[in-house]
């Protein structure tokens, strides 16, 4: 007797079933990802709508916005300074060695301008917001969700997006440029200190080359990136927090997902914006 006659399954049938399960799993994962993107887009639309309408109708909770700004700034300001100094120093050390070999020490400021202003500062600000600020937002909203406070707000006619998320959204948009400028100032200052004391670069030459290669357009795009990163972080952290389920473990999962997804989206957004900047605003001397 054959295996099929005994009720068993041939290797071909088993392979087809395994392939069918894999395809079904991939399709299910894609459909759930598209559904998550749709919910994120809807949440982003509600955030923007409520932010505009509440501001125009003077119904915005200004005190809550200021309070959230202070809370988010407290958890990101000091880490921003601590990250900015190594970033500026690393750029100065790595590039300074190469420029010293080719006899171009006078261009050390240009390296700081192109490295810190264009990429280092906005990415550092984005990573800080995705780590510290996203964790704070996701944990707060997740704790409210598992305690059913979000559902209670909906029952009494209070929109949680309007009451809880919009103040955090505006607060993040407000502190993002401040963090970016703070990191630029600290990073360039650290680069100047390393270049002047280690690589024997004249400070005046450093600032001259910095001003020659770092244009106002670079600063504008750097701040724009930081604002986009703040928007992405708030949307992801708020959605994960609102959808948290399963008790404390669900809150922890929401925080982890917020950080990982925010970092991934920040890297992708930075690549896209940098490419657009290179296409429409190519690097040129100031």
Image (spheres, rainbow, N blue to C red):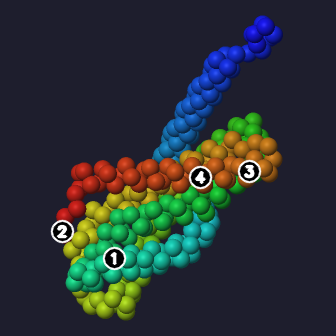
Front label number (4 vs 1): 1
Indicate left or right for 95 with 127 as reference: left
Res. 174 in view: no
User: How far is mark 3 from mark 4, CA to CA?
Assistant: 14 Å
User: How far is mark 2 from mark 4, CA to CA?
Assistant: 37 Å
Residue 18 in the image, given as x and y percentages of width and height: 66, 24
Determine crowd level at label 1: few under 14, some 14-19, many 20+ residues with C-alpha closer than 10 A: some
Mark positioned earlier in the residue sequence (2 or 1): 1
Residue 197 lies in quadrant = bottom left
User: How far is mark 1 from mark 3, CA to CA?
Assistant: 43 Å
Look at mark 3 in the image and give the residue it sits on. Answer: 251
Q: Residue at x 38, y 77 (%)?
A: 94
Determine crowd level at label 4: few under 14, some 14-19, many 20+ residues with C-alpha closer than 10 A: some
Indicate left or right for 112 with 166 as reference: left
Q: Residue at x 35, y 69 (%)?
A: 115
Which quadrant does the C terminus fall into?
bottom left
Look at mark 1 in the image and give the residue it sits on. Answer: 95
Residue 163 in the image, given as x and y percentages of width and height: 64, 48
Residue 93 lies in quadrant = bottom left
Q: Residue at x 52, y 61 (%)?
A: 127
Q: Residue at x 53, y 58 (%)?
A: 172
Closer-to-camera residue (91/116) = 91
Residue 135 in the image, given as x and y percentages of width and height: 65, 58
Label for residue 260?
4
Look at mark 2 in the image and give the residue it sits on. Answer: 285
Mark positioned earlier in the residue sequence (3 or 4): 3
């Amino acid at each position: 007797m054959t295996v099929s006659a005994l009720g068993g399954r041939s290797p071909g049938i088993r392979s087809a079933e395994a392939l069918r399960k894999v395809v079904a799993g991939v399709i299910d994962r894609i459909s759930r990802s598209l559904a998550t993107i749709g919910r994120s887009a809807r949440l982003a639309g509600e955030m923007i709508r409520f932010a505009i309408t509440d501001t125009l109708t003077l119904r915005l909770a200004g005190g809550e916005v200021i309070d959230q700004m202070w809370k988010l700034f407290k958890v990101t300001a000091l880490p921003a300074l601590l990250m900015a100094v190594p970033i500026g120093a690393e750029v100065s050390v790595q590039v300074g060695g190469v420029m010293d070999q080719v006899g171009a020490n006078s261009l050390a400021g240009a390296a700081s301008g192109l490295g810190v202003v264009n990429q280092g500062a906005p990415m550092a600000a984005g990573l800080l917001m995705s780590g510290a600020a996203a964790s704070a937002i996701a944990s707060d909203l997740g704790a409210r969700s598992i305690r059913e406070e979000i559902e209670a707000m909906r029952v009494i006619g209070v929109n949680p997006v309007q009451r809880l998320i919009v103040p955090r959204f505006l607060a993040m948009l407000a502190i993002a440029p401040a963090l970016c400028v703070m990191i630029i100032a600290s990073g360039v200052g650290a680069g100047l200190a390393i270049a002047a004391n280690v690589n024997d670069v004249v400070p005046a030459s450093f600032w001259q080359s910095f001003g020659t290669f770092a244009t106002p357009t670079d600063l504008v795009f750097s701040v724009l990136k930081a604002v986009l990163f703040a928007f992405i972080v708030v949307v992801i952290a708020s959605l994960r927090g609102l959808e948290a389920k399963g008790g404390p473990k669900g809150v922890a999962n929401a925080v982890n997902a917020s950080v990982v997804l925010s970092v991934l989206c920040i890297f992708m957004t930075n690549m896209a914006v940098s490419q657009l900047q290179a296409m429409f605003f190519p690097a040129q001397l100031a």
